[in-house]
Image: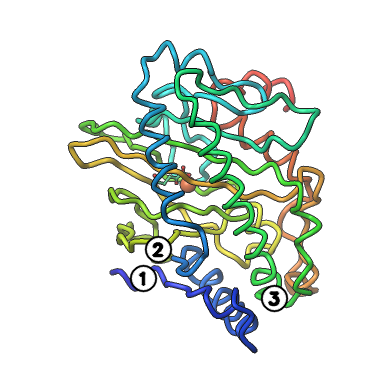
Amino acid sequence: MSDAIPLLDLGPAFAGEPGALEATAAELRRICETVGFLFIANHGVPFELVDATFAAAARFHAQPLEAKMAVKLDDAMQGYLPYKSSTTRANGLVAVRKPNENEAFFVNPERDPARPANRWPEAIPEFREVTLRYFAALEALSMRLLPIYARALDLPADYFTPLCDRSLSSLRLTHYPPVAYGSDEYGIAPHTDSSFFTLLAQNPVPGLQIRTQAGEWISAPVIPRTFVVNTGDVLNRWTNGRFLSTPHRAFNTMDAPRYAIPYFFHPNPETMIEALPTCVDEANPPRFPAQTVGEYMAWFRGQNYAHFRKDAATAA
Ligand SMILES: O=C(O)CCC(=O)C(=O)O
Ligand SMILES: [Fe+2]
C-alpha cells in the first residue's frame, strides 16, 4: 500500500537544477489531482529540529493539568486545547458527535503587533525558542514550495508569494494518549484540513490513515526523514475543486503516548479565495462562493472548537 501515497523528491527543484521546477510541478499536479497526499524528501528542514519539536510537545503535555490550563486556548486560537474538548463537526464526511481523544497546544506567528502574543508555559523555558524555530523553518519551507504549486497550476512562479507572505499559519502539538477506542471514537475524527496545505513531520509512531478516492481507509507508511503534505480546503476551493483535499484521521493504537506536530499553512487573512484563473472556464464555472481566508477560518473554527461555537452562532 505504501506507493498509494507518492513520494516527491524536492532536491533537484530546490537546488535550481535546469528543468527541475517544471518537472516537479508536473508531478505535484498529478498527485494533487489524484491523491491529495504526498511525502516530500530533501525538504531542507533539519532533523534535529523536528526531533526537538516532538520532545517539546511531549514535555508540554507531561505537565500537570493546572499548568496547561494556565495557557488555555484564547480568542486568537493560541494556547492549550484540553483533552476531548474539540469535535470534528466541519468535516462534511460523517456525523461525528463524540469529542476527539486528544489534547493540543497551538502556536501562532508573532509578527503582527495587533494580535496578542502567544502565551508560553512558564515551567519549560526552552519551549518557546524550539517551537518558534520550528515554526520559522516550516514557514520558510512553505514559501519555497509555493512556486512549485504555482507552476503546477500554470500560474507565474511568484503568483502565491505576495498572497501568503504574512500568513496566519499555525503549529499544532497534539497528544494522543493510548486509549481503547469505542465506536465512533477517534484520536482525531475523519476530516479535511482547512489549510492551503499541511506539513506533517514524519511520525515515529504510526496512526495516520487517509481515505483513498475509492473510499478505502489506508494507513500512511512510516518513511523516516520525510514530511507528509496534504492539500487543505483553502487550496481545494481556490483550485475550484481541482486539487483534492483528502479526508484523513488518526488513532493511537500503541501502548505509549503518540504526538503529532502538524503545521497548517494559510494564505494571508485578507487574501480572497475565488477560483484561480487557470481553474475556471465556461464549462467549469466557480463552485464555491468567493471568501477571504479570514472569513473562511472563522467559520471553520466555529464548527470545530467548542470554545468558538458561541461566536460562530452570533456571526451566522
Ligand atoms: O495525527 C496525525 O497524524 C494527523 C493529525 C491531523 O490530521 C490534524 O491535526 O489535522
Ligand atoms: Fe488533519
Which image quadrant is residue 310 in? top right
Q: Residue furthest bottom?
A: 18
Q: Residue at x 22, y 42 (%)?
A: 253
Check disc 1 and report its element: helix, strand or loop: helix
Q: Find disc 1 in the rendering and name its residue.
A: 4
Name the mark nearer the viewer: 2 or 1. Answer: 1
> Mark 1 and mark 2 in contact (Cβ < 8 Å)?
yes
Q: Find disc 3 in the rendering and name its residue.
A: 151
- In the rendered view, tell whether residue 258 sits above or below residue 13: above
Q: Residue furthest left?
A: 255
**Left or right: 148, with 90 as reference point:** right
Mark earlier in primary sequence (1, 3): 1
Q: Find disc 2 in the rendering and name its residue.
A: 212
**Left or right: 245, with 56 as reference point:** right
What amino acid type should be assigned to the residue bearing mark 2? Thr
What amino acid type should be assigned to the residue bearing mark 3? Arg
Distance (Cα) linking label 2 and label 1? 8 Å
